[in-house]
Amino acid sequence: MSDVTLDKAPVAPKEETPFRRFVSEFMASKIAVGGLLVFSIIVVVALLAPWIAPQNPYDLGQIDIMDGRLEPGEVGGSGITHWLGTDDQGRDMLSGIMYGLRISLTVGAGSALIACLVGASLGLLAAYAGGRTDTVIMRLVDLQLSFPTILAALMILAFLGKGIMNVVIALVIVEWAYYARTVRGSALVERRREYIEAAQCLALPTRRILFRHLLPNCLPPLIVVGTIQVARAIALEATLSFLGLGVPITEPSLGLLIANGYEYMLSGKYWISFYPGVALLVTIVSINLMGDHLRDVLNPRLKK
């Protein structure tokens, strides 16, 4: 009896979803992947700071003033090896950086998220409503963008005072305009699409049209701007804290850690400001590397 060979039907290749295509294009860049890896490590270190830090630098029971300004690698009176040295109060710099990252990331990401919600909502409303509403919102955007960002933030904090919430409010006020302008530009193009006209013919509520139909198609540029603005918010918060108008001393960020060692730079105690500065630089650069590649992936015109 002869064997009968049955021809197998060719298997159709699986269709690549937009998400899988986005992930593959993002992972194709070693620089972007490196930035993501570094930023992920920073986030994990910040979240686990209470458990992995050598000491709680803001617990008076764990601080010895006699350990003030120890050089990197020296052992303090409590037996702890201070790998990055100590500041003038005897606080371990490595622990201070871990705890400072928590504040910097929280303020940066929180302010960027709130500013994104406010700016995106106003940008969608301006593009969809048009007319006088669009004119008023965009004049506010132009007015906001005409002021130097750091000067506007300083003026707001001079009125509100120090505090994490006050810093977040100030950053939201100076950042929302970037999101509004970006979303409005994308929404003006989508506003003339057939699916928006169909939704209007069905008499759908304006809120549903804006947030369920119009907003999802404006997400690619919004994601890019949001990523860049997180890094910008972290840098602004560090600048404000360095100038003494940011977070309070009891909850210091990287900017305040840099400010604490500024007066000791000329005396050779470089590590008090240097290492927090390096941590701030690495954080901002890693976010910017991801944001730059996201812009290339999500904007077909920029693809090589």
Image (cartoon, rainbow, N blue to C red):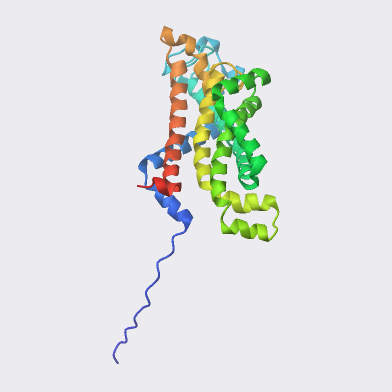
- Direction from residue 233 to residue 294 in the image, left or right: left
- Direction from residue 243 to residue 130 in the image, left or right: right
**Residue 205 appears at what percent x and percent y?**
71, 54
Closer to the camera in the image, 195 or 74: 195
Closer to the camera in the image, 218 or 138: 138
* Residue with the most extreme bottom position: 1
* Residue with the most extreme front position: 131
**Residue 226 appears at what percent x and percent y?**
53, 38
Closer to the camera in the image, 87 or 254: 254
Residue 49, quarter of the rendered image: top right
Closer to the camera in the image, 67 or 240: 240
**Residue 223 appears at what percent x and percent y?**
52, 43
Q: Residue at x 46, y 39 (%)?
A: 291
Q: Is residue 23 above or below residue 157?
A: below
Q: Can residue 54 be seen here?
A: no
**Residue 299 appears at what percent x and percent y?**
44, 47
Q: Can residue 81 be seen here?
A: yes
Disc tally is: 0
**Quadrant (top left, top right, bottom left, bottom right) of the N terminus:** bottom left
- Direction from residue 245 to residue 303 in the image, left or right: left
Q: Residue at x 57, y 43 (%)?
A: 184
Residue 204, quarter of the rendered image: bottom right
* Residue with the most extreme top position: 267
